[in-house]
Image (tube, rainbow, N blue to C red):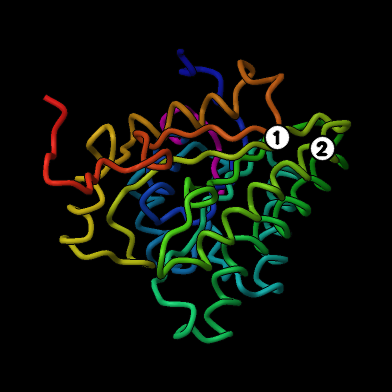
Amino acid sequence: MNFEREFEGRRVIVTGACGVFGRMLAKAFAEAGARVCLTDRGEADLKALFAEIKPASGSFICAADLTDDGSMETLLAAVGETWGAPDILINNAGIYPSGFLLDIDVAEWDRILDINLRAPFVLTRGVALQMINAGHGGAVVNVSSGASRKMRRTVVPYCTSKTALDRLTKGFALELAEYGIRVNALEPGFAAGSTASPLTDEHVKRVISTMPLGRASDEGDVVPATFYLCSEAASFVTGATLTVDGGNSIGSLDVYQAKKTAL
């Protein structure tokens, strides 16, 4: 499917833009001619990314702390002042800290839920109001995870946040449909390299070894799937979850017996 011209001039917000998937999407939308608003916590990192991808005129960066309401209000105000309203919101920002439930403290639980769930609620609500006031529809994509359906030890808060994000996706899809705003979720699978939630090389190798299709997610998987959900080709798709994770969420290749292969 060719989306080469579809996003030219479109106004796209990408949260967590300096993260693994965020960088992929920021670069792809910029190359497609979109005007982008890139947001993440660190302004210096945002400036470096902006200089690297060289997006279209009318693009901008806005550093924001997604655990802080005032910071998110500043982001929404900047979008409103610059564009009036966006066409697309990609709620990509998320964290994946590890810890047993008996060890994790309440503040860390709150931080995970604030970034992974509360921020998508606040930003989607704010952006939807801008779209409605501007008199046009739009598309929202929430970056979720197969962890919403596959519980994992030591990352229960993350799994919980993604399960709730899927329900929030469907709720917004239901309530915003009358305004022409489509809301969907993307499960892009496993990819290493996060600085917010770093993983050891041993862990990365172990995860990939158990995945049905045997590799991590990359730009060639994530970008076309996101573009599809934001495109006219998906104009009748809302409240859906698109899983592009190499089978990671359906099961594991681990074999718990002495005979390890079928043949």
> What's the mark number on residue 63?
none
Q: Residues within 10 Å of mark 1 (few under 14, many from 20)?
A: many
Residue 242 at x, y percent in the picture: 54, 32
- Of residues 22 and 80, the one nearer the viewer is 22
Mark 1: which amino acid?
Gly
Instruction: Give the residue drawn at x 49%, y 36%.
Output: 56
Instruction: Give the residue drawn at x 28%, y 35%.
Output: 212
Identify the residue under disc 2: 174
Above or below residue 194? Residue 233 is: above
Q: Is residue 122 left or right of residue 190?
A: right
Residue 154, picture quadrant: bottom left
Residue 121 at x, y percent in the picture: 72, 57
Identify the residue under disc 1: 239
Q: Residues within 10 Å of mark 2 (few under 14, many from 20)?
A: some
Residue 37 at x, y percent in the picture: 56, 49
Above or below residue 39? Residue 167 is: above
Judging from the image, what secondary structure is the residue with disc 1 in?
A: loop
Magenta-highlighted residues: 30-37
Residue 134 in view: yes
Measured in 3D between alpha carbons, the distance from the residue under mark 1 to the one under mark 2, in whole angstroms, is 7 Å
Judging from the image, what secondary structure is the residue with disc 2 in?
A: helix
Q: Is residue 185 left or right of residue 126?
A: left
Question: Residue 71 in magenta?
Answer: no
Question: Residue 35 in magenta?
Answer: yes
Q: Is residue 223 left or right of residue 216?
A: right
Mark 2: which amino acid?
Leu
- Of residues 94 and 251, the one nearer the viewer is 251
